[in-house]
Image (tube, rainbow, N blue to C red):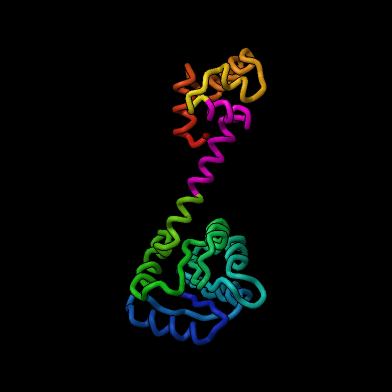
Amino acid sequence: MISVLLVDDHPVVIEGLRKLLSTDSGLSVTGEAHTAADAIELAQSLRPDVILLDLRMPGASGIQATRRLRDREFSGAIILLTSYGDQAYVREALEAGADGYLLKSTPSEELISSIHAAARGRHALSPELLDGVLEDLSGLAREKTQRDAALTEEDREILTRASQGATNREIAHAMSRSEIAIKKRLQIIFNKLGAVDRAQAVAKAIRRGLI
């Protein structure tokens, strides 16, 4: 039996969730709260397997409550259940330690299956939010690659122009540099990327999302 704590500042939402979860014999509502403070207190005393947590509530938000729960070493699953699908909220919730982020428009069957999945240690995310999360992860990966490669803005401009077929002389003219300076800079770029020539450097930079 999976125990669930319901947290929402609207009693009608709590009642609806309680009725919905009662249709699944594997779920049991162990308590309910209407504020983040009450949720934290009940979570510590009841130790539910899963918390369904609203995003916006009086006092602290669901994201703030998630951080405080994780700071207090709450080990159960936390799912934000909200009407707000802003990508910034999703990112912040996951960074705070949430195991899932579901919209209140989520179909009943999907909500129930997500609770079961979260209780087993899996993440739950509304499908319509997935593209945004993947885009975020891709962006973070590109930023990390750029930091790791330590390419300067000038390096990336040189590589971009090289990828467009510009010669060293053409790049030097466009950037108001000498051809020798561009040639030397390219050698530094090759070393940074582990490339042996400009073609390989361009290919590696494109593959890593650097240009």
Q: Does the segment drawn in magenta span residue 159?
A: yes
Count of picture labels: 0
Towards the viewer: 125 or 6: 125
Q: Is residue 33 above or below residue 187?
A: below
- By secondary structure, the bulk of the magenta-drawn segment is best described as helix
Q: Position of residue 8 (x, y in %)?
A: 54, 79
Front-lying residue, 63 or 41: 63
Q: Position of residue 113 (x, y in %)?
A: 35, 69
Q: Nearer the viewer, residue 157 or 14?
A: 157
Place of residue 199 in the rendered image (x, y in percent of width and height, measured from the top left):
45, 21
Q: Residue at x 39, y 79 (%)?
A: 21
- The residue located at (48%, 27%) in the rendering is 163
* Magenta span: 137-161
Q: Is residue 29 above or below residue 66?
A: below
Residue ID at (58%, 69%):
62
Q: Position of residue 24 (x, y in %)?
A: 33, 78
**Residue reaching furthest top?**
180
- Res. 1 visible in picture: no
Question: Is residue 92 positioned above or below 34 on the image?
Answer: above
Q: Does residue 89 show up magenta in the picture? A: no
Residue at figure coordinates x 59%, y 35% from the top left: 147
